[in-house]
Image (spheres, rainbow, N blue to C red):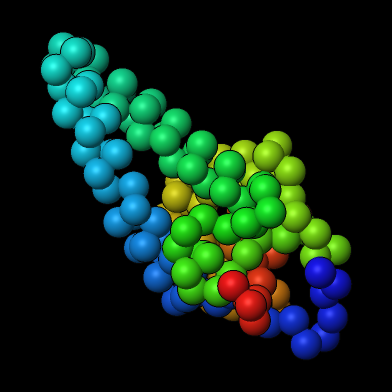
Amino acid sequence: MELDTNTEYGGFWIRVGAVAIDFVVLLIPSLLISALAQLVFSEEEFEFVEFFYQTLLWWVYSSVLHSPSWQATIGKKVLGMKVVDYSGERISFGRATGRYFASFLSTLILGIGFMMVGWTKRKQGLHDFMANTLVVRVKNV
């Protein structure tokens, strides 16, 4: 895919919709992980262990689906978007991993890194800038 001046980027609200779809997709696995963690670990260990496994689940889901030929999580795919580098090519698993963990910084600064999608020229959040990625709209999903 070659990026040009006609490239349409995934804006804030459609990306919120994609995350909502992803949340629904991962709801059952997340609940299972939580239930298993409650059975296996003590109350003191539970919060840390659950955070670790939930982070692991979302990281693998996000990075695996963003890096192969799909280039999108299920939510992005359903809404007609994909993640690319600045040349319009697919990103590596390593870059997808960096992009995922860079999103934690956006959370730490009160979500401002996510809100940047609403006002930057190419609809990039802080995590997109840090990973040198773009979320583009695609005609044929």
Examine the image and state in which quarter residue 35 appears: top left
Asked if one can make out residue 74 in the rendered structure from this viewpoint, the answer is yes
- Quadrant where the image shows the C terminus: bottom right
> Which residue lies most toward the bottom here?
6
Q: Residue at x 45, y 63 (%)?
A: 75
Q: Is residue 52 left or right of residue 70?
A: left
Give the percent coordinates (x, y) of residue 130: 70, 50
Residue 63 vs residue 68: left or right? left
Say how many tags the image has.
0
Q: Is residue 140 above or below residue 114?
A: below
Which of 112 and 95 lies nearest the eye of the viewer? Answer: 95
Task: Examine the rendered structure and indicate whether residue 37 appears above or below residue 92.
Answer: above
The image quadrant where one finds the N terminus is bottom right
User: Between residues 66 and 86, which one lies in front from this camera angle?
Assistant: 66
Q: Residue at x 20, y 13 (%)?
A: 41
List x then y, in percent, for residue 107. Answer: 45, 50
Can residue 131 be seen in the rendering of this structure?
Answer: no
* Residue 102: quadrant of the picture: top right
The residue depicted at 44 percent of the width and 31 percent of the height is 56
